[in-house]
């Protein structure tokens, strides 16, 4: 082989050989793509796991909020009912306070009727009409008048203003009503002032 032929052969061989220092773009790109795909799959799996974990937490949170809402609604309803009862009680107390101020007037009318002479017939009729009207109003508001003479003494209904030995009455019996009672049971506007029979000594 001549010198020129050897040079040509060497030149051809060097051109035909791949450059060891050239970047392997194809291989690097394929590797990066595969790595990105693996990362995406891992991220998807992590997201799925997070969703599976969060679902029970959200359900528990929703149940807790619903329970709190129901409790709050129940408390509001109880508050409304309690306020209504308190308002009704306050109205009743105010009504009783006003009606109590009427009772001395009624008492005075009764006294006037007891001490009126026959010559004052027209005046007596007028006083009776006023008295009866006042009693009707008291009864309308739930405080009718009661006559407790002959009944057993009841501390819830009667105030003992005195005692007397009475052979005709059982001990503990009301023998005389000094001041009549208005109302009954839990609605007593004023207990009766009474004189109670005691045992004879």
Image (cartoon, rainbow, N blue to C red):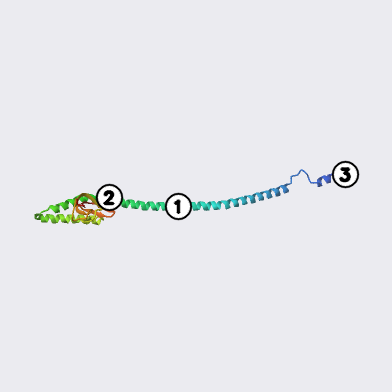
Q: Please tell me whether mark 2 or mark 1 is closer to you in this view.
A: 2
Image spot of residue 52 (x, y percent): 58, 53
Look at 27% across and 53% down and name the residue there: 187
Image spot of residue 166 (x, y percent): 18, 53
Q: Which mark is residue 94?
A: 2
Q: Are marks 1 and 3 in contact (CB under 8 Å)?
A: no
Q: Disc 3 on helix, strand or loop?
A: helix
Look at 55% across and 53% down and name the residue there: 56
Q: Disc 2 on helix, strand or loop?
A: helix
Image spot of residue 157 (x, y percent): 25, 53
Quadrant into which the N terminus falls: top right
Q: Which numbered disc, 1 or 3, marks the residue that appears first in the sequence? A: 3
Q: Which mark is residue 69?
A: 1
Q: Please tell me whether mark 3 or mark 2 is closer to you in this view.
A: 2
Q: Which numbered disc, 3 or 2, marks the residue that appears first in the sequence? A: 3
Q: Disc 2 versus disc 1: distance between alpha carbons?
A: 37 Å
Q: Which numbered disc, 2 or 1, marks the residue that appears first in the sequence? A: 1
Image spot of residue 168 (x, y percent): 18, 56
In this image, 97 relative to 81: left or right? left
Look at 37% across and 52% down and name the residue there: 80
Q: Disc 1 on helix, strand or loop?
A: helix
Q: Which residue is mark 3?
A: 6
Q: Quadrant of residue 151?
A: bottom left
């Amino acid at each position: 082989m001549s010198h020129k032929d050897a040079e040509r052969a060497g030149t051809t061989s060097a051109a035909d050989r791949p450059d060891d220092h050239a970047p392997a773009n194809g291989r690097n790109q394929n590797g990066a793509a595969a790595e990105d795909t693996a990362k995406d799959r891992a991220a998807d799996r992590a997201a799925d796991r997070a969703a599976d974990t969060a679902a029970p937490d959200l359900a528990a949170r929703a149940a807790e909020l619903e329970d709190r809402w129901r409790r709050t609604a129940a408390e509001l309803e109880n508050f409304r009912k309690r306020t209504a009862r308190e308002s009704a009680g306050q109205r009743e107390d105010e009504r009783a306070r006003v009606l109590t101020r009427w009772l001395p007037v009624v008492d005075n009318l009764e006294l006037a009727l007891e001490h009126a002479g026959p010559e004052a017939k027209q005046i007596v009729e007028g006083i009776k009409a006023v008295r009866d009207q006042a009693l009707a109003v008291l009864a309308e508001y739930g405080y009718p008048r009661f006559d407790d003479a002959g009944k057993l003494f009841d501390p819830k209904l009667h105030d003992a203003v005195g005692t007397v030995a009475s052979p005709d009455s059982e001990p503990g019996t009301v023998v005389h009503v000094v001041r009549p009672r208005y109302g009954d049971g839990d609605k007593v506007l004023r207990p009766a002032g009474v004189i109670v029979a005691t045992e004879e000594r």
